[in-house]
């Protein structure tokens, strides 16, 4: 599966760079939106077909929120350390890390709240986060455990990387991934400006 | 965002109320795989088509990659620790 993922992304980048004219960008956006909704539908069908998932979820209860909490703390630790190593402002570094992979929003917010360079770094680093997630999710699911495969995805685990998590793990993990992504997505617009003033 | 929720909900309704045969469930997961490859291709092409992002890559690429990889690395460590400590059965 990882091979297929890498080939698809690389082929996409190559085609986008070499062959696709800028005019078809709206078509690509529409097509990827359509593909995403279709995938989410198949994930939903899998969830609904597997009723024990919802029972297990009730057993686990609020403990599930430890996953997004760990991702927040892990991302901030990573941002802090990188900020120190690169000699960049600590608050800014924590803000960049608080994008949790949601590149469009964190990029736009930091371009407005900080400056164009920070915005571009936030955008690009969160694009990288999504790409790293796409490649590492199947590997983590195979070699560590299912729940840990949600970690690299961050906020994207409710949409773009949810189908990958669902493919690589099971319905229960997919549902927890969705809840995780939802929680982190809700926190991005709060945490990005919050840390900037540190 | 709301659209994702709507499609997931419709899927769950179909999955729980339609009596799906094993064959249909298998077809569903096959469609999921190929749909995923298609989505990733589109995702890659919007990166490839974004020329300003690619030209920025030289100047801020390394810093951005450092932020991304360290955030991912520590997220994995923290979540793995949490699953080992609190989710023994998973």
Image (spheres, coloured by chain):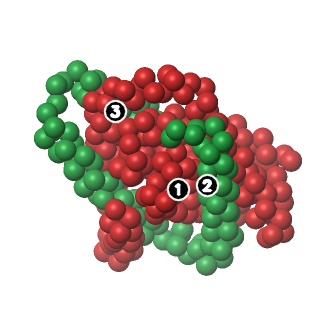
Chain letter of the residue beneath label 1 in the structure image = A
Please report contact status of discs 3 and 2: CB closer than 8 Å, yes or no.
Answer: no
Give the x, y percent position of residue A60: 54, 28
Chain letter, green in picture: B
Q: Secondary structure at mark 1?
A: loop
Mark 2 and mark 1 residues within 8 Å of each other at the beta carbon: yes
Q: Mark 1 or mark 3, which has the lower sequence index?
A: 3
Residue at 83% across / 57% down in the picture? Answer: A90
Q: Is residue A22 above or below residue A28?
A: below
Q: Which residue is mark 1?
A: A144
The residue shown at (22%, 50%) is B30
The percent coordinates of residue A68 (x first, y second) are: 62, 40
Q: In this rendering, would A168 be left or right of A88?
A: left
**Inter-mark Cα distance, 1 to 3:** 23 Å
Indicate which disc residue B16 carries: none
A145 relative to A172 in the view: left or right: right
Q: Are marks 1 and 3 on the same chain?
A: yes
Is B89 left or right of B29, judged from the image as shown?
right
Distance (Cα) linking label 2 and label 1:
10 Å
Image quadrant of residue A88? Answer: bottom right
Q: Looking at the rendered structure, which numbered label has been put on residue B76?
A: 2
- Residue B11, percent across and down? 29, 31
Q: Nearer the viewer, mark 1 or mark 3?
A: 1
Chain letter for the part of the structure drawn in red: A
Q: Are marks 3 and 2 on the same chain?
A: no
The residue under label 3 is: A47
The answer to which of B75 and A37 lies nearer the viewer is B75
Q: Among all residues in the image, which is located at the extreme right?
A: A198
């Amino acid at each position: 599966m990882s091979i297929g993922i890498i080939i698809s992304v690389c082929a996409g980048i190559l085609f986008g760079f070499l062959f696709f004219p800028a005019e078809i960008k709206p078509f690509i956006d529409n097509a990827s939106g359509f593909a995403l909704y279709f995938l989410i539908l198949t994930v939903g069908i899998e969830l609904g077909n597997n009723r024990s998932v919802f029972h297990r979820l009730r057993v686990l209860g609020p403990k599930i929120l430890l996953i997004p909490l760990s991702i927040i703390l892990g991302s901030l630790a990573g941002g802090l350390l990188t900020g120190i190593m690169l000699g960049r402002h600590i608050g800014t570094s924590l803000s960049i890390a608080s994008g949790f992979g949601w590149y469009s929003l964190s990029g736009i917010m930091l371009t407005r709240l900080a400056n164009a360079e920070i915005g571009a770094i936030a955008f690009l680093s969160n694009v990288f986060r999504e790409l790293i997630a796409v490649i590492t999710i199947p590997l983590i699911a195979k070699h560590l455990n299912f729940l840990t495969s949600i970690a690299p995805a961050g906020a994207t685990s409710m949409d773009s990387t949810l189908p990958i998590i669902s493919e690589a793990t099971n319905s229960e993990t997919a549902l927890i991934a969705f809840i995780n992504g939802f929680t982190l997505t809700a926190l991005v617009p709060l945490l990005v400006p919050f840390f900037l003033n540190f | 965002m709301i659209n994702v929720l709507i499609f997931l909900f419709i899927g769950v309704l179909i999955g729980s109320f339609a009596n799906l045969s094993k064959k249909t469930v298998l077809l569903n997961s096959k469609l999921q795989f190929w749909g995923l490859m298609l989505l990733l291709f589109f995702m890659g092409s919007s990166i490839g088509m974004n020329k300003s992002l690619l030209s920025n890559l030289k100047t801020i690429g390394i810093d951005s990659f450092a932020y991304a990889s360290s955030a991912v690395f520590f997220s994995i460590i923290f979540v793995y620790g949490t699953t080992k400590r609190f989710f023994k059965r998973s």
